[in-house]
Image (spheres, rainbow, N blue to C red):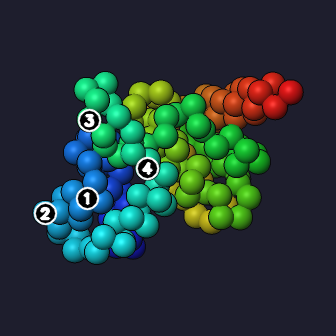
Amino acid sequence: MASSELRRSKVISLVESGKVHSQSDLVNLLGKAGFLVTQATASRDLEEIGAMRGRGVDGIATYQLPKAHAFPSELVLSVESSANMAVVRTPPGGAQLLASALDRAAGTGEFSLVIGTIAGDDTVLVISKKSDGGAALAKQLLALAQLTNAQTRRAKK
């Protein structure tokens, strides 16, 4: 995995922990984790993962990730399954965004069948927690994509 991907993964975990109040906080926290970055790099990473500043229930401003309902279902072109895996095809360049959303949803328990993902350019390999869970995983992915697309169509009317 490239160092920028490892760093962004760490940025996501730091943002999810609620410890990132500013870009300088992120630079310091990444430094403690062994990633020496500038404020400009921290800013780009926050933008890349879609983090935005917001106030928590305690009223303190921190960087936050979008909620799972912002699932990028328009990126799901097709889904096939085998054993404990589902293969999702996306438009070119869409796989990493979709994989990141799936990993976040799995981490919060909103997509409990997923153990993890691997993304290429236009393909995401989604791995089920169950050894024979590929078909159920594919069905859930398709249902989620169709539900989200239907909600988007209704909202536009």
Q: Quadrant of residue 23?
A: bottom left
* Along the line of sight, the residue nearer the viewer: 96 or 81: 96
Q: In the rendered image of this protein, does residue 31 appear above or below residue 139?
A: below
Of the image marks 1 and 2, the number of the one nearer the N terminus: 1
Q: Which mark is residue 51?
A: 4
How far apart in space, not on screen, are marks 4 and 3 (Cα)?
16 Å
> Foreground mark, 2 or 3?
3
Asked which secondary structure carries label 4, the reply is loop
Depth check: give the residue in front, 144 or 14.
14
Which comes sooner in the sequence, label 4 or label 2?
Answer: 2
Badge 4 or badge 1: first in the primary sequence: 1
What's the residue type where badge 2 is placed? Lys
Q: Nearer the viewer, mark 1 or mark 3?
A: 3
- Number of other residues with Cα within 10 Å of mark 3, as a class: few under 14, some 14 to 19, many 20 or more: few
At 50% from the left and 56% from the top, the residue drawn is: 118
Q: Residue at label 1?
A: 26
Secondary structure of residue under mark 2: helix
Q: CA distance from mark 4 to mark 2?
A: 21 Å
Measuring 44% from the left and 35% from the top, which residue is drawn there? 106
In the drawing, what numbered circle is on residue 60?
3
Q: Of label 4 and label 3, which has the lower sequence position?
A: 4
Real-space Cα separation, disc 4 to disc 1, in angstroms: 12 Å
| Quarter containing the N terminus | bottom left
Assess disc 4: are there few (<14), some (14-19) or many (≥20) residues with their C-alpha within 10 Å of its C-alpha. some
What distance separates the C-alpha of mark 1 from that of mark 3? 16 Å
Q: Position of residue 65 (x, y in %)?
A: 43, 43
Residue 32 tag number: 2
- Residue 107 % position (x, y): 39, 36
Mark 2 to mark 3 CA distance (whole Å):
23 Å
Q: Nearer the viewer, mark 4 or mark 2?
A: 4
Quarter assignment of residue 16: top left
Residue 62 badge: none
